[in-house]
Image (cartoon, grey):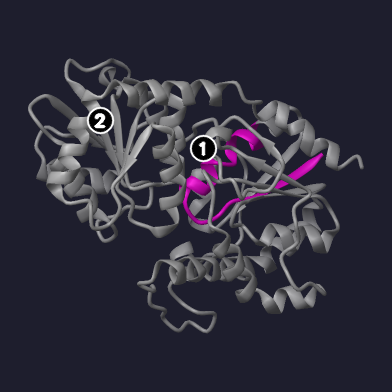
Amino acid sequence: MRILFLAGGSPATVFALVPLATAARNAGHQVLMAATADMSGVITSAGLPAAPVTERTMRDFMLADRDGTALTLPADAGERMHFGGRGFGRLAAGSLPALREAGRDWRPDAVVGGTLAFGAALLAAELKIPYVRHAWDMGEPAEMDRGAEDEMAPELRALGLTSLPAPDLWIDICPPSVADPGAPAGRTMRFVPCGRQQPLERWMYTPSQRRRVCVTAGSRVSKDYEFDHLDALVSHVAGPDVEVVAAAPEDVAAALRERHPGLRAGWLPLDTVLHTCDLLVHSGGGQSALTAVHAGVPQLVVPTMPKVLAPNQRLAAYGAARVLPPGEDGPETVAAACRDMLATPSYARRAGTLAAELAALPGPAETLTAVQALTRT
């Protein structure tokens, strides 16, 4: 069987699909993973073949209309999510020519698309093959889908459609206790953390003498994008009884190390490092959150995007996290919340219970059987 996987334009969108794609390849199936060209190195580093579908980046599609007109990010949270959906719609439309070419040349038997990889639905409809929609994280707001449908109206009309095709199978990767109650029925697969690896240093797998807190702003942070936010988090969390480590791309990590002498910072293998941590402080990214769930680590979330608020509030309601929304995330508040969470055992207990729930879910190899069954019906 040939399975085409479609990611997005950031490392997290690739890492989410890697476990199932690897399981398919290990089972003897042929696999291709398509994404924006700048993600090719991320895909190949995971041992999978990469098929670039556009030279433009995800940010290019988000911040410019189809005719190249620059767009401004809306201030209103609801409008911003619709705006984001339209951006992913433009990414799908811009990827369709290359996707169609891959479909003609390679002739996949099924397409697995990440949550907001809307080109997967259209390609599957054109080829009349099964379409699997695979969660990237803890859930995306429905307003993103509506924004994509508005943006892709011309492409949908060309296929005789008025809305995005429903998937033949929905794969969720969020533990049921904290899953989106509005998510479609489907299969829940155990989340398996993936990411770029590096040679381990001893401290990365050895518990610290002090309480260890990991701080990250996700894989898309740069010196021009959210650096000040990450730098502030490091400053707020640091203390004489707390060891801070920062997970960030190397150029960002170098800038952090210059500002905070002695700081351990870099593109850390979080699937290893978090098992030595007492707390993760992050900006709400779904892959970061689920990696912490996998490790059984409590989370303090300081969100920077409206769409991540609801999923992390579900973690907070479960008792495994706290969320400090905009307006409540000042330096003293962040520092006090860290101290309180480190001193309150219930957060670690609830995080451990959630980790056990995740570990009991069916893995990628078991979930692959449901994808295989679609091609036999």
Residue 114 in the image, given as x and y percentages of width and height: 61, 50
Q: Residue furthest right?
A: 377
Provide the secondary structure element on which disc 2 rests.
helix
At 62% from the left and 65% from the top, the residue drawn is 92
Q: Which residue is labeled 2 in the image?
A: 341
Foreground: 53 or 60? 60
Any mark on residue 91, and which? Answer: none
Provide the secondary structure element on which disc 1 rests.
helix
Residue 377 in the image, given as x and y percentages of width and height: 92, 42
Foreground: 47 or 284? 284
Q: With respect to residue 16, does 278 lie above or below? A: above
Q: Residues within 10 Å of mark 2 (few under 14, many from 20)?
A: many
Q: Which quadrant of the view contains residue 160? A: bottom right
Q: Earlier in the sequence, mark 2 or mark 1?
A: 1
Residues at badges 2 and 1 in contact (C-beta under 8 Å)? no
Q: CA distance from mark 2 to mark 1?
A: 19 Å
Amino acid type indicated by mark 2: Met
Amino acid type indicated by mark 1: Val
- Residue 101 can be seen, yes or no: no
Residue 33 in the image, given as x and y percentages of width and height: 63, 47
At 78% from the left and 47% from the top, the residue drawn is 110
Tell me which segment is drawn in magenta: 1-22
Q: Which residue is labeled 1 in the image?
A: 178
Residue 153 in the image, given as x and y percentages of width and height: 68, 77
Q: With respect to residue 181, does 159 lie above or below? A: below
> For the N terminus, which image quadrant?
top right
Q: Is residue 332 left or right of residue 28?
A: left
